[in-house]
Image: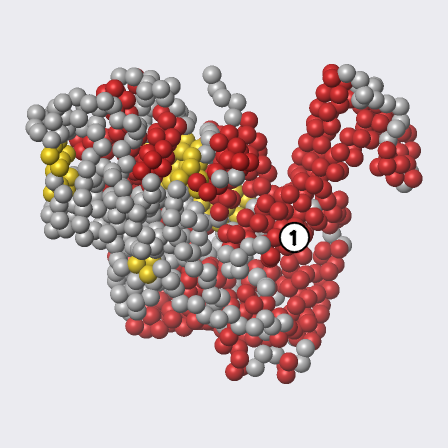
Amino acid sequence: MMEPKLVYRILRYISDLALSGFYEEVCVEGQENVPEKGGVIIASTHHNEIIDIATLAATIPHRRHVSFWAKSTMFSNPISKAILDSSGAIPVTRNLNSSSQTQTQTQTPTSNSSSSSSVPPTKPHAQTSLFTSTSLALASSSVVGVFPEGTSYTEPGIVQVKEGAAWAGVEFVRWVKQREREGRDNGTGVRAMEVGEEELVIVPTPIVYTDKSQYLSRVCVKYGKPIKMSTYKSRILACSFPPKLSQPSITVSSPSESSIDVVLHSPTPSPPPSSNTISPFPNSSDSSSTSLSLSPSPTQDTLHVLRRDGEEGDSLGKIVKEITREIEKGMVEASVNAPDWDTLLAARLARDIVWGDEKNLPLEEFVDVTQRYVDLFSPTTASSSVPLPPRDLDLQAKAKSALLKYHSLLYHTKISHASLEAIFPLPRQSSASLYTRFTTLVSAIWRSSGERTRLLAPPQPSGLLPLMRASIPGLGRAMGTFVREVVGLVGHPRLWVFLTPGILWVPGYVFGLLASKFLAPRGEEEAQAQFKVIFGGVGIGFSLGGVGWGVASVWRGLGRGGEVGVLGDVLRRLGVFDSLTRLGVVDVAWKAGRLVFGSGNGTGGFGEKARVSVGYIGVVWFVGWAIVKWHNMVVGGNYTQFKRLRTSYKVLIGLLSPPSSDVPLGELGKYTKPPARVENPFIKRKANSHTGQPVGPSNDLENPAPQANTIPKTEAPPPVASRKLIRHLLEARWEAWEALMEFACDMMSGHEGWGDEELGRVWPGLG
């Protein structure tokens, strides 16, 4: 019998509304990789706080129920605990990634590394409870949602992938085998013969946001190729349940140089273990010495030979690392990853310059195209360590520097390139061959055997991109553009169609902006997005709820003989009621009101009160649903036009201001550097071997690089009025464009006639 799971269904419905309300488009790929039945572990990226949970709940194929791992601290509040328990959440304890924290415990000996586990060393019973609850959920053919990165963060790529998801899969295989050996349900309600009938799979699931804190941006979710635990089952069981041996019990505690730890148990039967899952984590993050003991198995007649990482032989730790590599590979391949912020920001802006607006780029191609631009601005190719030629490196550095300067000025003026390009487009020349050569080059990057050719640039327009530098728009052109944008907003019918739902959305806009400004930590994009969605949703909910309640009151009043309340009186004074009466609408509403609410005054028995309550709820829900659909249909064009109007106003004010009021060139450097990023204390970084500075993720899980938990912080420049930066911004745009075209065209002319193999050494993805 299917559980009702009403709390989860309500939360999922709210997730649907939040996702469709805040983001303009959601693309879901790889639905075929999530089976309709059987246990599934969704290993997802975690770059947008609670919105990631809402995204998975709303997009999971077959609308399956997802039980998420949640921080144990969220269960401390009785109200949140009741909601989380009712929705099937599983508590997990975590601590800061601090090398000074060395909590010890007795547990199963495995590989001597816990740094990449998503469940750091804590109390044994917490780990046992986590994996037992997870195994029970998987055994009942549920989906478990895990975020292997261990925390939500904003970085230029995936920084860390911990081992929690892999351990959950391994522990489930062991748990199933233990249930089979016991031959009973052990009070869990799951019979041994029913456990594991459907194959367990781990599905890497990257979630990519085009601009996660920006209203009406886009989201791409890709459910990757499933990792089948059956591939590792025999090895897992060989480590967990070796053949029976009649040997005396002995425990060997090995010093740091020993490569083999042996635990022998006598065949004497003993009571079953008190826990359903044997904890997999080592005693301490300190690897200088290890004292090992094994929790008793159901028959205690096992021989465990467990080797340290890097030694010959198999171990659970080694298997977990292999699975974690597969998870990381699936997450990285379907997401955007740059070696540093400068590369990512330059790549994004180069993409936007070529496409005009990233929304012109099909969402299903967004990740792949953006990653190719990242590769263009990386010192080495994506597929090898072949460096670019010196001249190309110089041009690449020049283009990157110009793009970063332009990006920083856009940031400080709060203007988007898409809006600036829309009102002051780059001039076109029909005789130029620059655009043709550039698109030929970036198209070649996408050639691959057996696949269609995909472009890094949009199809060639009727006009071509500029060869010559254009001047900054004159004051007359700026003023004419501003007037044009005002007329385009106010004079277009879409504004008047949008007016009613737009007014009702004002509380949501205000609440969301204020919450993101005053409640979210400065610089944390994921926190800003979360507060915008939550508090914006609350404001909209109050607004629509009030309107729905008013409509229900008027409707019920009609059914009771014309008692229409305050809202009805307003409609009568405006003459709306008379018009609706002549059209016969009031008569139809009167009959429908009596049908929905009855003819009583609501003071009767329980049946009458229940009927009135259900009627009110139904009307409020329907009115809210209708207005939400109405708003979402017409908000996009108006929002885009409003941003263009705001940009044209800023440019006009900047050009009206005297040049002497602009930021002096000597002080401009403060505003031409990307803003400082906030450090996440739950992230462990590897240090750059050359600079000693922390960088991105280490792909070598067996030999992780030294960790550094801090990044250099730069002081933010003082706020400045955008009008003082407008001329600098327009100059920087042309500089960025020229540098980008020079870099691309030099590469093209320098490698004409090359085959795929030769060009592939310079441009990533080719060959």
**Relative to 110, 409 lies left or right:** right
**Relative to 162, 608 lies left or right:** right
Residue toward you, 108 or 704: 108
The x, y position of residue 96, in whole percent, is: 38, 51
Q: Residue at x 48, y 19 (%)?
A: 2
Classify the position of the C terminus by image quarter: bottom left
* Picture quadrant where residue 650 is located: bottom right
Q: Residue at x 14, y 26 (%)?
A: 301
Q: Residues within 10 Å of mark 1 (few under 14, many from 20)?
A: some
Q: Residue at x 17, y 21 (%)?
A: 269
Outermost residue, left direction?
247
Disc 1 secondary structure class: helix
- Disc 1 residue type? Tyr
The x, y position of residue 428, in whole percent, is: 55, 66
The x, y position of residue 337, in whole percent, is: 38, 54
Residue toward you, 152 or 476: 152
Q: Is residue 350 above or below residue 309?
A: below
**Relative to 125, 306 lies left or right:** left
* Picture quadrant where residue 426 is located: bottom right
Residue that label 1 marks: 639
Residue toward you, 612 or 657: 612
Q: Residue at x 36, y 60 (%)?
A: 709
Coloration mode: secondary structure
The x, y position of residue 652, in whole percent, is: 68, 70
Residue 576 in view of the camera: no
Q: Is residue 474 above or below residue 591?
A: below
Residue 276 in view of the camera: yes
Residue toward you, 686 or 574: 686
**Relative to 648, 760 lies left or right:** left
What number of labels is visible? Answer: 1
